[in-house]
Image: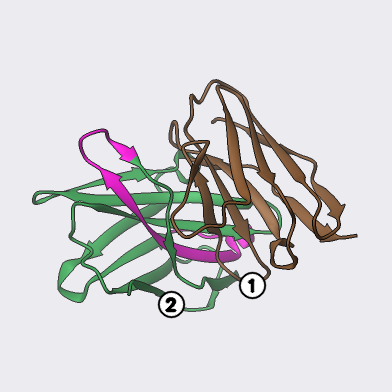
Amino acid sequence: DIQMTQSPSSLSASVGDRVTITCRASQNINKYLNWYEQKQGKAPKVLIYAASSLQSGVSSRFSGSGSGTDFTLTISSLQPEDFATYYCQQSYRTPWTFGQGTKVEIK
Amino acid sequence: QVHLQESGPGLVKPSETLSLTCTVSGGAVSSGSYYWSWIRQSPGKGLEWIANIYFSGSTNYTNYNPSFKSQVTISVDKSKNHFSLKLSSVTAADTAVYFCARGDYDVLTAYYYPPDYWGQGTLVTVSS
């Protein structure tokens, strides 16, 4: 299986901060990388697909970059509604696998 | 408006079979434009993809997570517009919130877009 490793596991930030989360794959996954946001008690919501494509309806303050094994999710200016847990997921090869999550908390 | 809703028992005994159904409204499960997934989430293992199913013509295609070996079956009932998950010989490790989800599938490129419609999730506890 392809292992997905996110860092950090958690972070504290303030409204207006620029936030960066990284995701590393255990092997080359080209650009088959998706990012999700999950709030407590809710299903995950897709933010970014194919490493850098913004899902329809998602705020442009979210952006993704990377290819191969190293990827980044950036929130350009953190908003109150962005405090949540973020997951990366590879769809290059089954079984699809997820990172362990990054919890973004209020500083 | 697409809506997915999981249903099934919230408590299953060890060694028994977990059976869940996802009822779909606002779209046909037989559409070749979409795939249908089961994904679960537990404190111990995080998010875990279980299986996908999609249709091409009159044939359905399935993909399973090998971690579940032969325990798992995903199926579709077109007449009821729902799809189902069966997980046999469950243990306490199968206690999780189970989500059903739908994603777009591009037949030409064989590209699976990430699931963009999800059910609310249903907690299944395995305990005697």
Chain shown in brown: A
Q: Colour of chain B?
A: green
- The residue drawn where x is 33% and y is 37% is B111
Q: Position of residue B2 (x, y in %)?
A: 33, 71
Residue B89 in the image: x percent, y percent?
48, 58
Q: How many marks?
A: 2
Q: Amino acid at mark 2?
A: Gly
Give the image location of residue B66, x and y in percent: 45, 39
Q: Nearer the viewer, residue B76 or B25?
A: B25
Answer yes or no: do the residues labelled 1 and 2 have beta carbons within 8 Å? no
Q: Which mark is residue B8?
A: 2
- Please, what secondary structure does the residue beneath circle 1 have? loop
Q: Residue furthest right?
A: A107
* In the image, residue B38 above or below residue A72: below
Q: Quadrant of the N terminus of chain A?
A: top right
Q: Residues within 10 Å of mark 2 (few under 14, many from 20)?
A: some
Task: Judge if badges 1 and 2 mark residues of a common chain.
Answer: no
* Quarter of the figure with residue B97: bottom right
Range of residues picked out in magenta: B88-111
Instruction: Compare residues B66 and A10 and report the one nearer the observer.
Output: A10
Report if residue B126 lies within the magenta region.
no
Q: Quadrant of the C terminus of chain A?
A: bottom right
Q: Tell me where residue B19 appears, x and y as whole percent.
A: 40, 69
Farthest residue to the left: give it.
Answer: B58
> Label 1 belongs to which residue?
A41
Q: Is residue A83 left or right of residue B85?
A: right
Q: Say which amino acid is labelled 1.
A: Gly
Tag 2, which secondary structure? Answer: loop
